[in-house]
Image: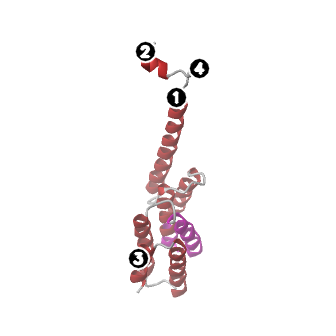
Amino acid sequence: MSDDEDMMYDDGDEYFDDDDDQEDQNDEESEGVEIENQYYNSKGLIEDSIPDAIKSYEKVIDLEDGVKGEWGFKALKKITKLNFQIENYDVMLEKYKQFLSYTKSAVTSNYSEKGINSILDMISTNTKLDLDLVQKVYDLTLKCLLDAKNEVCFIDIIYFII
């Protein structure tokens, strides 16, 4: 028996199957690809129907199966922006809260800062918005940043607010 064959057996001469680890890794990769595909399919629906695109982005979050990740972060950012675009402000606030929960663990602080800033830019540049809504968005953002104790992002956002 060669050294390589000897490594496949333990003291009881039982064969170890390393294929299970490979299958688990392949399953995780295929789930990641499925989530990514769902995200890009959703993106393609925006021009045809924003409500259908929102539903499709919701599936991205469902596919994460409770594990917050980058694709869910991206999907929630889009959902927030799309609800804002169709003036569905109550749902937008609800989805923004959910989006902010992803900034604590799903993505890097730099990436979360960019995402938050893009939404704050969108909100602050709309001159037709009720100031109460703008205040709610900024209050949610501030609370999230204080809870996360993300000093760098907090300082950048505070500077942005001023």
Q: Quadrant of the C terminus?
A: bottom left
Disc 3 target residue: 121
Disc 2/disc 4 C-alpha distance (Å):
16 Å
Disc 2 target residue: 2
- Give the residue type that dot 2 points to: Ser
Disc 3 secondary structure class? helix
Q: Nearer the viewer, residue 109 or 68?
A: 109
Residue stretch in magenta: 82-103
From the viewer's perspective, tell me whether residue 14 is left or right of residue 7.
Answer: right
| Residue 30, above or below 12 | below
Front position among marks 4 and 1: 4
The earlier-in-sequence mark between 2 and 1 is 2
Disc 1 target residue: 19
Disc 2/disc 3 C-alpha distance (Å):
65 Å
| Residue 143, above or below 3 | below
Q: Are marks 4 and 1 in contact (CB under 8 Å)?
A: no
Q: Residue at x 56, y 52 (%)?
A: 64
Front position among marks 2 and 1: 2
Q: Nearer the viewer, residue 112 or 90?
A: 112
The earlier-in-sequence mark between 2 and 3 is 2
Whether residue 49 is visible here, answered yes or no, is no
- Give the residue type that dot 4 points to: Glu
Disc 4 secondary structure class? loop
The earlier-in-sequence mark between 3 and 4 is 4
| Residue 59, above or below 7 | below
Q: Which quarter of the picture shows residue 161?
A: bottom left
- Give the residue type that dot 1 points to: Asp
Q: Check if residue 144 falls in the magenta segment.
A: no
The earlier-in-sequence mark between 2 and 4 is 2
> At which x and y percent is residue 63?
57, 50
- Give the residue type that dot 3 points to: Asp
Q: Which mark is residue 14?
A: 4
